[in-house]
Structure formats: C-alpha cells, structure tokens
Amino acid sequence: MTDITISRRAALMGAGAIVAWASSPARALLAEADPQALPARIEAIVQRMTLEEKAGQLQLNAAAWSGGIATGLNPPSNGPSFEGQVADAVAGKLTGVFNGNGAEMARRMQDAVMRQSRLKIPLIFAADVIHGHRTIFPVPVAEAASFDPDLAMRTARMAAYEAAAAGIDWTFFPMVDIARDQRWGRTMEGAGEDPLLGQLFAAARVKGFQGRTLADADAVMACVKHFAAYGAAESGLDYNSVDLSERTLREVYLPPYKAGFDAGAMSGMASFNEINGIPSHGNPWLLRKVLRDEWRFPGFIVGDYTGDEEMIAAGFAKDGKDAARIALLAGVDMSMQSNLYAQHLPALVREGAVPQAVLDESVRRVLAVKHQLGLFDDPFRRIDTKRETARSRTKPALALSREAAQKAMVLLKNDGDLLPLAPSRRIALIGPFASGQHDLNGPWVVYGDNNQAIDLATGVKAAGARNVSVTPGSGVEEPLAGGIDAAVAAARAADVVVLAIGESETMSGEAQSRTAITVPAPQMALAEAVAATGKPIVVLLKNGRGLALEGAVKDAPAILVTWFLGSETGHAIADVLFGKVGPSGRLPLSFPHESGQEPYYYAHKATGRPAPDGPRQPYKAQWRTSPNAALYPFGHGLTYGKVSYAAPVVPATLPWDGRIEVAATVTNSGTRPCEELVQLYIRDRVASITRPVREMKAFRKVALAPGKSERVAFTLTREQLQFLGKDLQPTVEPGTFDVWIAPSAQADGVHGTFDLVRLGVRSGRS
C-alpha cells in the first residue's frame, strides 16, 4: 500500500523550504554523525538546544486550525490563533500539534518551521484516528467482536494509509484498556473484558498502523493508551479513581499494554485515573519501574489532555509548576495541552528542582522517534494535499469497512429462525435509527462524516427490499408526538418489524458513563407498543457497550447487536438481515441481566459460597433478582447454522515439560453455511492463589458447510497455565484442570479434565 510515486519536493511550498531544510543545523548535525549511531546523532542536536527549546520539544497542543468535530471532542481552551501557533512553533515552543485540519495546515506549519526556526527540528502531527480517518470502520469494541486480529490489522493499515496522506505522523490509538464495567462509556474504544483478546488486538492494531517501518510514508506511529488500568475506574465513572491489587493490575490490566509495546509501539499515553492513590501522570513506579526498567520500553510517554495539570485538582500537586515537576520526574516525557512543560521546565531545571539529565533524556526520546518517523530525512514526507484527496474513501477502503461491519455484528437470539429475512416480505423499519444520516459512524470520529455513511433504510432498499416503510416512533431519549401511534400502524401493516433502537453517539464514548445501561425509556415504550401488535420483531441494537436488556426488547424473537458500524452501516446490516452473509461475531464483553450487576465479567472468582446451577439457594453469591451469570456471556453469538459440539478428546495428564492436544468435533446440522468461533477455556481447580471460574486460552474460527463436521484441536502446554504466585512472579502448580471447548464462556460445549504432573506426582501443590 506504500505510495512509491511520492515526490518529496511536491509537498514543499517552493525551493526556499527545500534549501532551508537542507541547510538546517539539525540536518547538518545528523549528517555529520555515523548514520548507525543514532544516540550520538541525537545527542549532537540536544547539546545545541536551549532549555526553552528542550521544553518546547516536550509540549504538544491541539491545533489552532482544526475542524468543528475536532474542536468539540476536547474541552475548550483559550489557545492562540493559527498565526500565533505557527509563531510558537517557529520559536521552538511546540513539538507539534494534534487534530489539525489536514495536509494544508500541516504544510503551512512545517514550512514555517523549516524556513524560520533556529534549529529547524521538524514538527510532529498527531490525531485521534480511533476507528478510521475518512473511511470509518466499526468502533473498536465492535471490531473486537469479530475475534479476528488480522481484520483489525487490516483496518488499522487502511486508516494509516488515509491518515498519513493527510500529514498525520502519529495516532492516539490503540486504546487497550480492559473494560469490565459496562457503565464506562469508553468501553467502545477497546477490545472488551478479556486479557487474551485485548493482547491480540493491541498487537494487531499497532502493527497495522506502523506497517513495515515507521519511516514509510504510509506509516503512522501508534500510541498505546491509557497507561494504566483506566478501564477499572470505580463505578464506571470516567476519570475516576482506580483501586486495584498489584496482582490484578499485572494479571488482567497490564498484559494488553505490554503486547502493544512488544509489537513495536513507540509511544504510550498516561491515563487520567489514579491507581491506589497515585495519579498515573505522577506515578514513577508505573512509568519508570514497570515501563522502563521491567519492559525496556524505548519510546516516549505523552500525557493525556491536560492530565498533568489535573493533578492539582486531584490534590497531588500544589500548582502548575509543581505538576510539571512531578510529571516529568515520574516519566511523562511530553505534556499535552496544558502548556505546563513549556511554561515551567526551564525554571525548574535552573532552580535544580528537575535535573537537566532528566529533561535531556525525554528530549532524546522525542527526537529519536521523530528520526524513526523519517521526519529528519524529509519533514514533508506525509504532507501532500493531492495525495490526501486521492487516498480518501477509496473503493478498497469502503469494501473493507463493509467487511469489518459484517464481521462485527453479533446475533444474540434467533427464535424460530426468524432471520434471515426474505426481501420480498413487507418490512416495517421502526425506531430512531431506522433512517437518517446520524449516529452511524459512532463516537470518537474526528475526520469522518455521517452524511457520507449509509443508513439502515438505504441499505435495506439497496439490498432489494421493495415493500419497506420507515417510521422513527420515538427519539433516542425523548418521545415524539404521535410517534408510537404511527409506529403501531406501520407494524400492523407489515409482515415483520425491524426495530432499530439503542444508544446515540453521544451516549457512548468519553465522559458518557451511565448508571443504567438500558435502552432509554422512550424507546422501551415504543418497543412495548410495537410488540403488542403481535408481529415478529427483529431488534437491531446500536450500542458501544454491553446492555441490560428488558421487557419487549429482551423478549423479541431475534436480536442483532449492530454497535456503531461506520461508513457502510446500512449495507452491512442488510447483508446480514437478508442472509447474503451469515452473522459470525461474538460478544467481547458480557451483557448482564441488570445494570446493578456491574462490574460483571465472565472470569470472576467462585467465592466460598458459589451460586449453584438449578434452583436458587439461600446464602449464596447471587443477587436477589438475578443469577451470578450474564444474560448473554462473553463469547456468545449465534450463526444461521445449527452447531453442536461432541466427541471431546482430553488426555488424562499433561507432562510438566510436554504438551497435550485437546479436541472436539463441531457439526453444522443446519441448512445454511456458517462460521463458528470455537473457544478454549480452562480452570485451575486448586491453587495457592484462587483462580477464575474460567479463563480463555485460545479460539479458532471454523467454516462449516451444511451437514459438515470438523475436528477442532488445541495444544496446551504448562506455560499457558501460569499465574502470578504469592511473590507476584509467574508460576504454575501441579494439579487438576478443567477444560472446555465451547461456544461461549458460560456454555458447556464439551468438558473434560486433565492433571498437570511433575516427577510422577498427579496432584497437589508445589
């Protein structure tokens, strides 16, 4: 996908900019040093810099020239005009900007810096490219429902291809926070509740954005965020405190970050939350001991939007100067938006409050990454207005968006095989999301446009349905005058109702925590009224989190989770509704029975009084009105086939240094082909540290033609059974393990047991 016809000079305003860069002190210093000795080359530049220029290299701000969407995504600030921001960049007060207005803006800023600044250190341009640039893909949690990391790599690669053409060097993605409380609005940005799935998608997205090498003109540097454990915010409240044991932090929340860094991400972002009383922006244990000393991370850490300054309100820093000192010493290399580093670091160094060596080390990291991005070789390598247009919303990009949307949808329920529908049936599209260019792309889209996305009604009609009525029935969070009466009339005149309900874009995402994760009351009233007509109902859920389904929605014969699917929403939904493709997605998070179960996740502990299967018993770990289980568990999802599991093969023992193969036969006895997600779970029955009731260890997708079977096998080794022992070091103990090959975290599938043995001992603990 690399554009091999790029002309570097085509991006420049004229010969003056070329000459300015060619003769710049920074480029000259790089050229003088051994090309293989990157530290020495960077050091030569650092030694030339003033304290103010060094502080400027650690200051990143929102672009003064940005689009309306970008402006609305972050809290307002009284920043400079575009001309003022250019002047700051020329004066060495900025390392770069984010969420700017495309290649033309980047060209003007970079040209000014290359012509007029003292050292001519290139700017870096960043953006929130979360699930697409101009072509929008499903929100990340929806994409995770595909259980297809390769798909995530491909959508990230395409997003980078588009974004790099617009002058973007760096994206603030992937978000890899484990989300086990569905009240948290930012669930939609990650991969759900499971650490293994989180690790696989973190690595895939990093590799997709960064491509073969960061210096390629279609590569965009990834930023692993939010470090760390932001998804564990108390009560699912955004920006709230996190209180975790180090064991849970290391076993559940940290692995996806490490996977992203191990995949090559050269930047990370500190999280807004505190952990055990210490804000992440001021946590040297997290940012230095774990990240630098243990993981050997070589890149740089950027603060989140005014995250360093927010330590003042949190009661951790006295004032802005104190916050800047704390953040840099803790390991935040770059400050975002607060301007605290530019304002205070020079004085802090002169006063001895911050060692110059600490400042210089952060500057080296930033310059080294700019070098890896190829910016010292060509500051304009990603800035080309013609290429920006040519790469935007291409046919391959839109085809990939449609494929990703198809694979993201999850069929929760299909009583009586109501789906797929025949296009010849009389269909009543009802609900606030039945039609219209709104709420299609989803939250956290900076450059996409809902007006370019395909809505449901358009997609259904394009698929060949001719007898289709469209009735909103209600607003998202407010009733419509006469809406229910019109919807009931439409339902009565139809053979089947397709009820498009759920959350709007503004109900999910950052700062959109919910206390009740239910379908809003006006839409529930609509659903109840339509259900009373007795017509069969297919519910299409629009959501960015797991929902607690109630009443007529819960009781509908068919429920399809459609999330926020992006540019090709309507076409993709119609493909699944009418059976052009079968549903293949699975839930990457649990749907609870009630909101009050949150936080809920499948890999919970049994407790000393586990709730039994069967009739309710008193004094057990259960709620008064709900079981200690999900309504729809992690991994759940139906197909248009009829899949069964049989013939388990589980050897009796796993040798300490050996391996075993566990297997099951999966059969599609239905009349339609399907793609089944076969999942492997284990449980360590007795251990020195209590273990979850189940942990996913592997999964595999299997295509099954009607009437066909396939034997699906997984290999297990001792390493896959490890956990953190009493000393917080990886360990594994001999003993008995349960193993399931199943279609979800709560399904039985097929079950067996094996013993991990060492020196002939079949059970017990080491």
Image (spheres, grey):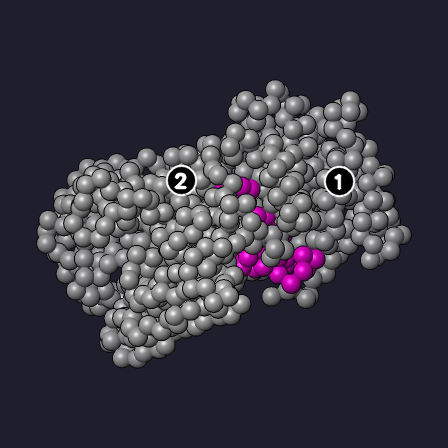
204 horizontally vs 648: left or right: right
Residue 397 in sight from this viewpoint: no
At 27% from the left and 79% from the top, the residue drawn is 707
Q: Is residue 215 magenta?
A: yes
What x and y, as percent, mark residue 274? 52, 33
Disc 1 to disc 2, C-alpha distance: 36 Å
At 70% from the left and 57% from the top, the residue drawn is 215
Residue 356 in sight from this viewpoint: yes
Q: Residue furthest bottom?
A: 708
Local SS, label 2: loop
Q: Amino acid at mark 2?
A: Trp
Q: Amino acid at mark 1?
A: Glu
Q: Which residue is mark 2?
A: 184
Give the magenta-colored segment's residue range.
Answer: 202-229
At 27% from the left and 57% from the top, the residue drawn is 412
What x and y, as percent, mark residue 409? 35, 59
Residue nearest the viewer, comparing 730 with 482: 730
562 horizontally vs 250: left or right: left
Residue nearest the viewer, comparing 751 with 59: 751
Pointer 2: residues within 10 angstroms few (<14), some, or many (20+)?
many
Q: Residue furthest front?
A: 760
What x and y, as percent, mark residue 573? 33, 60
Q: Which residue is mark 1?
A: 361
Local SS, label 1: helix
Q: Residue furthest top?
A: 318
188 horizontally vs 672: left or right: right
Q: Quadrant of the N terminus?
A: bottom right
Mark 2 or mark 1, which is nearer the start of the sequence?
Answer: 2
In the rendered image of this protein, does residue 707 appear above or below residue 188?
below
At 78% from the left and 24% from the top, the residue drawn is 352
